[in-house]
Image (cartoon, rainbow, N blue to C red):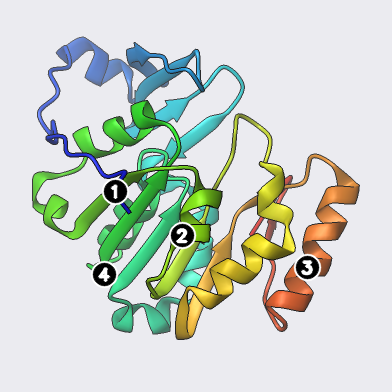
């Protein structure tokens, strides 16, 4: 894997006091960027949490990202033994912030196809976490095709706006995720039920590849 990059964290991003105060009332846009994949990328501050929004979706909500909070709580008893975590679809690295807030401190491989998103995730990361983080700018599908490492926890949170790329609901991708888990490892998939037939297919595949898995629903979010 050669598509790594280095950037410095910016834990002291200068934010006017009035914006910090307003952010406790409603989300305040702090900065806007764009990329070839996302013409609109807005960084919001809300109640001391960073949010990343596109023109039609919210990608991250800091330590309040409900899908991953729920998933991590379900496997909390196993988390003390987790040393290696793979996150496919990084956003602003909510997975990292939630696990660290739960007082678990593994090493992380963060994969995202959009360099602008991944750069922001690292820039906003507390400096003392960076030594345990390997950022990789790569399509998650390509990464899994090339991956030879084993992880104790794999989180798949891959979206493009409000849609899930087709490869996520493929047998090949799910099998690659399974073979990349250490014995006894956990796979967490966050999926959006936009198309009912596609959702039925992913349920069928999950039953086949990960028999006995549990499922939690938050509206169109399925964990």
Which residue is painted at 23% across and 20% down in the image? 20
Within 10 Å of disc 1 (Cα), the crowding (few <14, some 14-19, many 20+) is few
Instruction: Report whether 141 appears left or right of 202.
Output: left
Q: Mark 4 or mark 1, which is nearer the start of the sequence?
A: 1
Q: Mark 2 or mark 4, which is nearer the start of the sequence?
A: 4
Q: Nearer the viewer's eye, disc 1 or disc 4? A: 1
Could you say which quadrant of the image residue 120 lies in? top left
- The answer to whether residue 124 shows anywhere in this view is no
Q: Mark 3 or mark 4, which is nearer the start of the sequence?
A: 4
Quick check: marks 4 and 3 in contact, CB under 8 Å?
no
Query: Residue lying furthest right in this view?
Result: 197
Cα separation between marks 2 and 1: 11 Å
Q: Looking at the rendered structure, which numbered label has been put on residue 104?
A: 4
User: In x, y percent, where is residue 213?
Assistant: 67, 77
Cα separation between marks 3 and 1: 31 Å
Could you say which quadrant of the image residue 56 lies in? top right
Locate the C terminus and report the quarter of the image it occupies.
Answer: bottom right
Q: Nearer the viewer's eye, disc 4 or disc 2? A: 2
Cα separation between marks 1 and 4: 28 Å
Q: Mark 1 or mark 2, which is nearer the start of the sequence?
A: 1
Tag 2 residue: 146
């Amino acid at each position: 894997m050669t598509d790594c990059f280095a950037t410095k964290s910016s834990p002291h991003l200068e934010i006017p006091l009035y914006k910090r105060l307003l952010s406790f009332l409603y989300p305040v846009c702090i900065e806007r960027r764009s990329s070839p994949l996302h013409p609109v990328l807005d960084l919001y501050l809300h109640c001391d949490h960073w949010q990343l929004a596109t023109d039609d979706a919210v990608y991250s909500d800091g330590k309040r990202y409900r899908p991953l909070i729920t998933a991590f709580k379900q496997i909390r008893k196993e988390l003390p033994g987790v040393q290696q975590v793979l996150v496919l679809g990084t956003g602003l690295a909510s997975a990292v912030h939630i696990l660290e807030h739960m007082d678990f401190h593994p090493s992380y491989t963060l994969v995202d196809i959009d360099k602008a998103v991944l750069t922001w995730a690292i820039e906003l990361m507390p400096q003392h976490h960076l030594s345990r983080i390997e950022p990789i700018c790569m399509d998650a599908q390509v990464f899994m095709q090339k991956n030879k490492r084993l992880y104790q926890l794999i989180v798949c949170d891959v979206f493009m706006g409000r849609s899930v790329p087709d490869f996520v609901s493929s047998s090949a991708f799910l099998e690659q995720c399974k073979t990349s888990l250490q014995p006894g490892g956990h796979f967490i998939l966050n999926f959006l039920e936009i198309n009912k037939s596609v959702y039925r297919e992913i349920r069928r595949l999950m039953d086949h590849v990960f028999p006995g898995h549990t499922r939690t629903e938050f509206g169109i979010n399925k964990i």
